[in-house]
Every structure is written in C-alpha cells, then in structure tokens.
Image (cartoon, grey):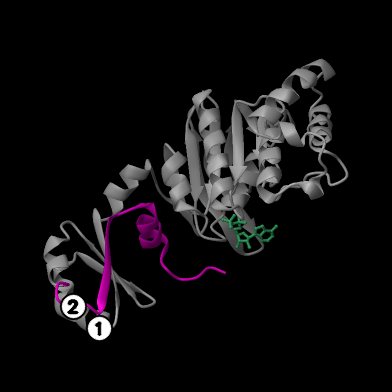
Amino acid sequence: MHMLEVTDLRKSYGDVEVLRGVSLSLARGECYGLLGPNGAGKTTTLRACLGLVEPDAGSISLLGLSVPTFAREARLRLGVVSQTDNLDPDFTVVENLLVYGRYFGIPEQTLQERIPRLLEFSELAARADSKMLELSGGMKRRLTLARALINDPDLVFLDEPTTGLDPQARHVIWDRMKQLLARGKTILLTTHFMDEAERLCSRLSIMDDGRIISTGSPQELIARHIEPEVLEVYGEGTQQWVNTHASLADRVESAGDTVFCYLRHAEPLIATLENRPSLRYLHRRANLEDVFLKLTGRDLRD
Ligand code: ADP
C-alpha cells in the first residue's frame, strides 16, 4: 500500500485551473519533495490531500483511506507541520502539546509518557514551562514539529518547515527529519530551498503552473535535465568574454551580471579565463537549483 496516492487531481478557482492533473505516490519510508515557484499549486495539492480543498476531479488515497470522504479519519493518523506555527500563545510548551494531544483523543496516560520524549526529541525539555513569547523562531518550529508527532504518525506533511529560520536552526530541523526517516516514518516536504530538497529527499517532483513537470531522485533529475558542470563568470568584461567563447559551453544563461555556462568539461573554458584578472569565476557541479531554474525559468513569480 502507498502511504499517499494522488491520481490526476484537478482544481479550478473561477476560470483559473490551478491543479491541472497532478499525480504522485509516496512509498513507506521515503522523503518526497514537492518543489515549485510561488503559485505552482503545492499548497492546494497538500490541502486537497488533507481534505481541506475539494478537488474537481481525481482521486486521493491517504494511508489507505479515500479523501475527502474519510479525510477526518486519515488526518487523525497523520502529522502536519503547517507553514505558520499557529501555536497557542496563552499556553506553555507542555500545555500546547497536551491540548493538541487531547484534541486527537489520545489517552492522558499515553500523553504523559509521550510528551517528555517529544520534549527531548525537540530539545525543548528545559523550556517545558515557557510561554510562546519567550521562544525563538527555531524553538517554535521545533515545538510545531513535536506537536505534529503527538499521535505518533507514520506519515508527516511538512510545509516549508525551515522558511525564516537561521542556518543553525535549519540544521536542527534537518537532523530531526533524518531521525524520523531513520525510524521508518514517511515525509512529504514542500520547500523553496533546493539544498534542503537535495539533502533530504529520496524523490521529488518539480511543479509549475498546476502540473508536475518532472519526478525523480535529485541525482536523476540533475542527470536527466542538465549538463554536469557549471562555470559562473562575473566581473568587468564578462559579456565580451562570453561573446568570444560561448561556443565552448553547451548552454549559456545570464542572470544580472553573472553568466552561467553549463557544460560537460569546463577545463577548456576555464583556460580562456587565464590572464583575465577582471573576470572572476566559480566552477562547480550542477545542482538541483540549476535544474529548477531550467525547468521553471528565471522570471520572478511574485
Ligand atoms: P504554491 O503553494 O505552490 O505557492 P498555491 O497552491 O498556494 O501555490 O496556489 C496556486 C494558485 O491557486 C495560485 O495562483 C493561487 O493564487 C490560487 N489559489 C489558491 N487558493 C485559492 C483560493 N482559495 N481562491 C482562489 N485562488 C486560489
């Protein structure tokens, strides 16, 4: 059984079709990423899976239950970390966990056993009695994650879990996600951060304009869509240099004052940069961000 199976999901608001046939499936134990620019349809897809948006067509099976018909039953067995923390500001850390657990109908005895373990897991044991105002952004995110685990779910949805966090706090969230995966949990992750997806996801889909445009492991997507090496060149005289040597690259893109040369072997092109002190360059392997920008374009989506 798949943990989540979505088939040909469609949804329109007025004349605008925001989901145009989305299909995806999650096997047990994988971390599956949903990536796409703003407005691609990621949140609408997640909300449909939770039974909060009614699709016009398509089918959803969540933990073996048909959604939206059995959405409530499915949600009780799921963990959800939404984009905003929506913690109760009047409650302490422990009270937030307790109230959420009671909402799930979890017996008091189970909660008393589970909460200390969740505080340990989220490194909030020393903050058990703190109110929300006293917590940093990273602590609130960790509490939101702990809260999503109160029902010991097999499948966890994480909607942009590290947006707005500093690098230290992001690494802690990543580490906790890895711990969950090591325990056999399944994760559906939406993110804007390509390094996050590349680090954590065993498979991912890139979405744009209500459609999934490519699915695979990060390495598969890179190999499928893009040349293996990148030379980024910037500085005075870049344009003139590229006009002369562009033929040595398989593909050239410009963004601001930087030129991105995509190619199989960068050495011949790097050689042309010798004795050009005004030009600076970075030679690196192609990554998921290069794939994302190639498939969805460099235009702003706000
Ligand atoms: P993402 O999460 O990828 O940024 P969303 O799923 O939030 O994308 O949005 C996809 C599109 O659907 C956007 O153009 C958004 O404006 C539109 N949309 C989302 N929810 C509604 C709604 N309730 N009413 C009208 N349009 C909506």
Q: Which residues are magenta?
A: 273-302
**Can residue 289 be seen at all in this image of the molecule?**
yes
Residue 174 screen position, x and y as percent: 53, 40
Residue, disc 2: 276
Q: Nearer the viewer, residue 267 or 23?
A: 267
Residue 297 screen position, x and y as percent: 41, 66
Image quadrant for the C terminus?
bottom right
Quadrant of the displayed image that contains ligand 1: bottom right
Give residue 249's mark: none
Quadrant of residue 79 within the rendered picture = top right
Residue 138 is left or right of residue 203, and the answer is right
Q: Is residue 53 magenta?
A: no
Quadrant of residue 73 within the rendered picture = top right
Q: Nearer the viewer, residue 203 or 71?
A: 203
State yes or no: Cβ of the residue under disc 1 lies below 8 Å from any atom of ligand 1: no
Residue 188 screen position, x and y as percent: 55, 39
- Mark 1 residue type: Gly
Lower position in the chain sequence, tag 2 or tag 1: 1
Distance from Cα at disc 2 to Cα at disc 1: 9 Å
